[in-house]
Image (spheres, rainbow, N blue to C red):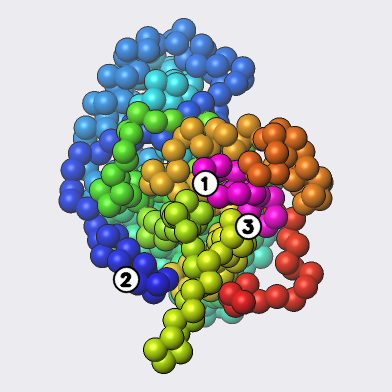
Amino acid sequence: MFKKSILLLSFLSLPALAGGVNFQNDREGESYYAGKSYNREIQRTLREVEGRDILNVYRNALGGFNDSNICAYDLNESMLRSLGSMRNGFREYEGVIYYLRSQNQIDDVVVKVLLDAHETSTLKLDLPKDRRSIRLPRDRKAVDDMVLVIGDFEKRFLKNSCFDDAYRSLYSELKKTDKGLDSRGLEALLVEAYERRLIGSGTYMALERARENEVENKWTTLKSYFQKKRSLRTNKPLRDPNEKSNFVTNRYPKSAFSNRMRLMEYYNDFQIMLMAEIVKKLRNRIEADKAEILIYRKEEIETIPLEPMERFRLAVKLLRKEMALISQNHYFNGRSPDYMDIISASYEVGAIPASELAELSSLEELWNPKKSFWQKAQTWVRGAGSIATLLLPPPFGFIPSLGIVIIEMTTQQDNTNGNDPTVLF
């Protein structure tokens, strides 16, 4: 069944038809970037330029791109140029990005991408470099080869690409020559290429800013996000495009981004659809009218009906098995999605409505890692009213069952008994 789901989704994930570029927010409730400090940024910006002008500048700038050439660096540059012509010496660009988010013209993923690009483009450099503090790799032949690659950056990598894609391509090419190349080694190579006059000062500073800002580790680009989102909306149309959720804009534990930002950063459209299928199947099993085990022997068939608690346990075991299998699947490149990931993925494609996510997120005790499984369960039982509400399948609902699954799995009970989650019984 799991292989059939993969085969089906492989057809669904074919590239969608080309269309206009649009980053309008259609999933997120209150922004991850909401708060007093961000509001102050917006107010400072609005003292410099009017909101309607910001919207016009953004729409005009976005209209100059298509799905093949959309680029955060170029979009930022285009908007800054237009805003600068309206207000000489305009400097409040971050407030422009936050304002666009406050008007739902963009979502938090686009905010992060534009902010990252703006930070890289405007990063202050400590120049000139102290040659005593930098060291070239020892292999002189490798050094000569790598500085020549850097010298070809504009013609070979940047000519038909956005700067972030071009820089990542350059970085990957350099790593082919020296697999152990680190940031300090690249710093020295850039200085060497500049001093040999293989690159100009502008290219050197752009590459050095990208190195300091670790652009090679930022996987999401404006182009890749647009294509990913378009594929998801084409293959999995939203039943309610106006639906919004605050759950997905909550901060992902121990990180500097939201649940949805992590989802879009770490997973492609195919992986997101696969994760959503797991929750969809969990719902179908829990909400099924009945569940039975059939035993066949020649002409005899033994039917064993499952009681509500047995059905719930079976659904949990199947969920564990599918989570283990999906983390082993080559489509995930060694990544192991957690429960926040699959819930966010399910909402992204409309498999879980925002109202159910709100019900889950309101139970703060559910996400408290300091409490044991039964402490969490007992707290939730008191809030839900009875053990039946918590544990039983319909008519009691999908969310209580999903909640108890998350409680159980986040406490990692099974990690201590050596059970193989890929084995059902």
Secondary element under disc 1, as helix, strand or loop, is: loop
Whether residue 135 is in magenta: the answer is no
Q: Position of residue 248 (x, y in %)?
A: 52, 38
Label 2 Cα neighbours within 10 Å, binned few <14 / some 14-19 / many ≥20: few
Which residue is painted at 67% across and 35% down in the image? 384
What separation in Å lies between label 3 and label 1 (alpha carbons)?
11 Å
- Magenta-colored stretch includes residue 408: yes
**Image location of residue 212, percent across then percent down:** 58, 49
At horizontal 41% and vertical 35% (from top left) the residue drawn is: 27
**Residue linked to disc 2:** 7
Q: CA distance from mark 2 to mark 3?
A: 32 Å
Quarter placement of the N terminus: bottom left
* Secondary structure type for disc 3: helix
- Magenta residues span 391-409
Horizontal side of residue 269 vs 33, given as left or right: left
Q: Which residue is mark 1?
A: 394
- Front-most of residues 98 and 144: 98
- From this viewpoint, which residue is outermost toward the bottom? 298
Cβ atoms at labels 1 and 2 below 8 Å apart: no
User: Type of residue at label 1?
Assistant: Pro
Let me know if residue 411 appears in the view. yes
Residue at 73% x, 60% y is 412
Q: Is residue 99 above or below residue 5?
A: above
Residue 258 percent across, percent down from the top left: 56, 40
Q: Earlier in the sequence, mark 1 or mark 2?
A: 2
Which quadrant would residue 54 be assigned to in this image? top left
- For residue 57, side relative to residue 290 (left or right): left
Secondary structure of the residue carrying numbered label 2: helix
Label 3 vs 1, first from the N-terminus: 3
